[in-house]
Every structure is written in C-alpha cells, then in structure tokens.
Image (cartoon, rainbow, N blue to C red):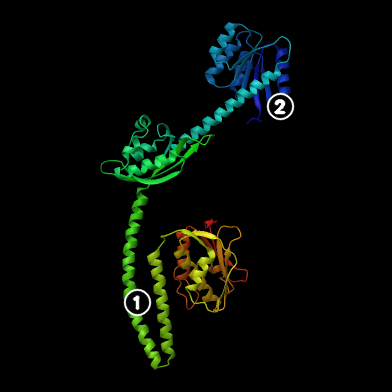
Amino acid sequence: MSNSEIIVLYVNDDPDLLTLVSTRLEREHNRLTVRTAHSAADGREIFEMGDIDCILSDYHMPVETGVDLLRSVREQDREIPFILFTETGDEAVASESISAGVTDYVIQDTIGNQSELLARKICSYVDTRRQNQQIAYENAQLQELSENTDDALWVFSADWGTVRFVNAAYEKIFAHPVSELQENPQSFVHRIAAEDRDRIQQAMKRASDGHSVQIEYRVNKSDALQLWVESRCKPITDAKGDVDFIVGFTRDITERKLHDQQLVEKNAQLEQFTSTVAHDLRNPLNVADGYIDLAREAHDSPYLKTAAGALSRMNTLINELLTLAKEGAVLKDRRKITLSELVQTSSQNILMPEATLEIRDSKQIRCDPARTIEAIENILRNAIEHGGPSVTIIAGMLEDGTGFYIEDTGPGIPDAERTVVFDRGYSNSAHGTGFGLAIVKQVVDAHEWEIRVTEGAHGGARFEISDVEITD
C-alpha cells in the first residue's frame, strides 16, 4: 500500500502555478500523478469521474472558491483528503475551510519550493485513509462472519468485568439478551446449570491467570430445556506478558453428547451380547476340540487333522470377530510408549519361531498401547501368513517423522488389492479369516491416524502409519 500510485487533483486558475506545482510534485515523489483543473467546476467534474485519491486546491478562483469546491466534494465523500494550498492567510478563510471539513490548510510561500512538504502530507493523508478503509473492510467482513455462525463468539476483559465483543449467536445459545450481558458481563453464569457453575468459575479464573481453557457444561435454556455446550478460550497478553483480554467461543454440542450417550449404551448392549455369544460358541467348540484330540489318540486319520485345523480356524475367527465387535472405535488409554516396546510385545503374543524381527529405529509415540499392540500383532500375522514362517519383518520410523512402518520380505500385496485389504472378510489366503487387517484399520481410525499399503525395500508388503504423535 505504501508504494502504490496516488492520483492527485490540483485545482488553480493560474496556469503558471498549475504547471509549476504539478511538475514539482511528480518530480518530488514517483508515487504521485497529478491531474489539473483550471476552475472549481472543472475540478468537480474530474473528481466525479472517480480515481482521485487527494485534492489540492487554491482558494481564490473566479465564480467559485476552493471552499465552495470543498463543500461540494464533502457532500459526496467525507473522507477524501482535501488540502487548501493558497497564498491567503486570512483567519476567516481558515475558519471557513475547517468548518467545511478541510483536511489541511497550507499557506503558499512567495519564494521557495514547498513540493517536499506537500508531497509528504499528500502521501501521509492518502495512506492513512487507505489503511482505515482496509480496516473498515476487514471489520465488516469479520462482523458478517460472526453474525453468520451458530457459535457464540465473545471477547471479555481479563477480569471478566467488561464485554468487548459478543455476536448474536450468544442469545440463541444462552437464551439471554446480549444487552443484559453487556450490562452485567458475568450474568451468563446464572444461565449455567447449578452443578456446573463451580467448574465454570474455576475455568474463568484459569483463563484470567493466563491459561487456555476448554470445558463442557450444561446451559438451562428454559425450565424444560437444557443444552450441552462447549466453550474454548485463550488469554491474549500485552507486551509485558499480562493478560489484556480473553477471546473465545461457545457452541451447542447437545446432539454430539446425545450421540455419545447412545453409543455408550449400544456398546454396553453389544458387549453383553458378544460375551453371551462367545460363551455359547466356545463351549461346544471346546467340546468338539477335546473329543477330536481323544479320537486322534486312538486313530491316526487325516480327516481328524483337517477337522482339528477347522476348529482352530473357527477359534481364531471368533476371537477376531469379538475384537471387532467389543472394541469398536473407542480408545481407553493414551500414553507414551516406544515403537520397539510395542513391536516386541506384539511378537511375543503370536507364534513366529522361524521368523526374523528387525527394529531399525524407535521413538516414543502417544497411543493406546493395548489397541496398538493388537494392530501390530495382526500385521505380523499377515506377514507370516503370506510370507511363510521364515519371513523377515522390519519395523522403524518413517523418514519424514510422521509415524512408523512395518514391512516384510514376503511376496507383497498387488496394486489392485491395496485398496481392499482392509475390508472386513477380505482375504486371499486359504488360512486367513479376512478380519486381521480390518482390525488394523479400525485401530488406526480410532487413533485418527492414516495407513497406506505400499511395497517394501525387499518387494514385500509395507504398512506405513502416519499422522502419529511422536514424543520426546
């Protein structure tokens, strides 16, 4: 903005001064382009054509004076810089000019070049006006945005004693007039459910002490209606580090809370159901497995071996189905743990006597260890199923620092199958259940991570898990 062109309209009935001042101004600063007019009427016509940033005018002119021109300009534009540059130092003229809204009044010296002074004033006034216009435009956009959101946006003083800003959505959420909030800034607390007020007041104090806050609580919108809302706020400090004001927003999360409650109830019902099913399935399965073992002691038959294998596969299938059904997308615990510890623990939970496990590098990640171990176990099983018992499995951190990988030296996964390997029930192995990698995807999604399948350094399958929180 400070380097952009400025178009100046200079009005003077003296042709010599018109040419002299215009030439000097343009030479003084390369930002200035001067258009000229020989009378107030001509000047008004040029101004009304637009694109003028500043008007410089003489006072004494025939028919109409510079102040007459000023008055007509102010009827159309109250802000455009208007400088009277005249040889008249009359107090009455100066008073008349100020009353009409002149920006500045400069008396022309008889001898000397005042172009530097004029150029500096013109640039300063125009730049200030443009900055104010930009601020006004941005404020209008922010105001429009704030009034077109369902979130209550607000700004309080550091002690919560003054409301600096609040949008109309506040009244919709709290059922409380904005005017009353502005009159009594802490009156919103009385709209909060009594059992949550202490927590809110403690959160307000933490914000005043300089801490960002996120809190969920209930609002009594009416005697019969209560909302769940979430508020987030951040203290803004001054140059000394003291809290100057607090900005934040409040949004209605009632629908989300109801959904969470329904999900908890459904999960409880599902867990009860799966426990019952597991019991009813495993009992006859154990009986069949026991009698097959007894039969194999008495008879060496390949049919009994096949039946025993089928029962083993049924047991694996039941375990994986129960895992999918009971665990869902819920994480129970997140903490820091190293990748090497996760992989080593996973390898101890499966049979891999001939396989080789290499951990190239390891860092701490933040995760639910039990669920992550469960996912890694299934990746290791997948490697053994497809790569054979003597497969080599390699784990390490991604080079870009966003997560970790596990790859093997097996045959790999064809491009056409990489988008479907995580589908439930999909398997290209005669011994696979099709649920192992579905469990992996479920755990990854629960952590809000990303997973992709690609080709490893040795041609085998490579699983890259990214968007992982890596910690020191």
Mark nearer the N terminus (2 vs 1): 2
Q: Quadrant of residue 446?
A: bottom left
**Residue 449 position within the rendered picture, expressed as x and y whole percent measured from the top left:** 50, 59
Work out whether residue 58 or residue 246 is closer to the camera in this orientation and state it: 246
**Residue 9 position within the rendered picture, expressed as x and y whole percent measured from the top left:** 64, 20
Q: Is residue 206 visible?
A: yes
Q: Quadrant of residue 199?
A: top left
- Which part of the image, by quadrant, shows the N terminus? top right
Q: Residue furthest left?
A: 223
> Vertically, is 279 above or below 239?
below
**Residue 298 position within the rendered picture, expressed as x and y whole percent measured from the top left:** 38, 93
Q: Which residue is mark 1?
A: 282
Give the total number of marks visible in the rendering. Answer: 2
Q: Residue at x 53, y 12 (%)?
A: 99
> Vertically, is 167 above or below 326?
above
Tell me how far mark 2 sits from mark 1, CA to CA. Answer: 90 Å
> Vertically, is 67 above or below 252?
above
Q: Is residue 52 visible?
A: no
The dot on residue 30 is 2
Describe residue 246's horizontal placement relative to residue 83 as left or right: left
Q: Quadrant of residue 466?
A: bottom right
Q: Residue at x 57, y 78 (%)?
A: 390
Work out whether residue 109 or residue 18 is closer to the camera in this orientation and state it: 109
Query: Which mark is in front, 2 or 1?
Result: 1
